[in-house]
Amino acid sequence: MNNKNKEYNINKPIYIFILIIFMLLLFQVNIAFAQEVLEVKEWNVDLKPEYDDPRLLVVHEIEMKESVKFPFEMKFLIPKDAEIGMACEIMENGGHSCKPFDINDVGEFSELSYQVSSRPTLFFEYYTNAIEGDPDKKFDYLFKPFQNIESFKINIQQPKVAKDFKVNPVPMESFSDGEGFKYSILNYANLNPDKELSFKVNYNKPGNDTSVAKQEGLGQSAQQQNSGSGITSQGDNNQLILLLFFIGGIIFFSFGAMTFFNNNKKYRKKYYKGKSKYRKKKKKKRNR
């Protein structure tokens, strides 16, 4: 047997070992970056233009399904200019347990996420500069979930002094509450992350007067509490860096072992001698 064949036979198990390690790492990477789709029982969104602020107030109230396992990460798609009011779990007594949140840039929008530790009912609100024009005003709202949603409801509040209030798509129902607000309502069932809902609202209202006076309270304090976590998430980046270091370590170890194997003549001779004895035994058995 010539030297090339010897080296090929010696290196073959190491090449196979490296290939196996590489395939296992690819499998682990897929698991690390695969996101489990959460199951939501009910999701209500309130759109409140010029409610207590000249901007659009967006309020999310969510009830997760009982099958959801804690803790989990909740994600929302939000406008880039969103000013976060609260990102919370709703406690049994009705109080809000607000959480630190992260915001990542995902192109045209941002992605807000926070960890939910124990409660299936969630609350999230923000303000956005979505309203355009004066006195003929308009705004668009896009809802794109990261979760599977069994029942989705959107309530669009009409400012108290607004006229010619129109919603597209046409609302399925409407009602008035005890505070003098009128609402347009649309209901949807069985939404998934592939589904986008788009809403367009037009109305006439001169000036920037709000429907109610703004109360400084829980929303603002929650924003100050959560803003300490920063607006750019580093969690995913840190995991990726650690994973790359791990992969680099495996590759370094594998090539180091291969180099030692090739350069250590004593070990190569012992390895090849063992292979020769094994082949001779097999040949004797065949001759019998």
Image: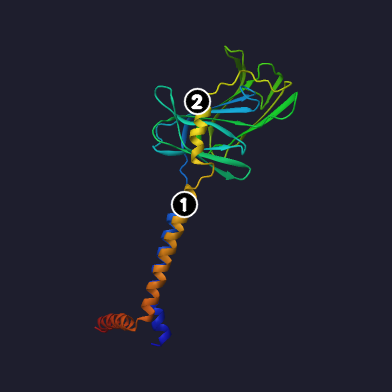
Residue at position x 69%, y 23% in the image: 208
Secondary structure under badge 1?
helix
Q: Are marks 2 and 1 in contact (CB under 8 Å)?
A: no
Question: Which class describes the residues within 10 Å of circle 1: few (<14), some (14-19), or many (20+)?
Answer: few
Q: Nearer the viewer, residue 210 or 188?
A: 210
Inspect the image, locate mark 1, and give the three-letter code of the amino acid beneath it.
Asn
What label does residue 218 carry, if any?
2
Using the numbered discs, state the Cα–Cα distance from disc 2 to disc 1 in whole angstroms.
32 Å
Residue 81, position in %: x, y? 62, 37
Q: Which residue is mark 1?
A: 238
On screen, residue 230 versus residue 11, left or right, reads right
Q: Is residue 257 left or right of residue 285?
A: right
Q: Residue sitting at 68 percent across and 20 percent down?
A: 209
Image coordinates of residue 125 in percent, x first then y, are 54, 29
Say which residue appears at 63% left-offset and 28% top-offset: 56
The picture places residue 61, in percent across and down from the top left corner, at: 51, 27
Name the amino acid, label 2.
Leu
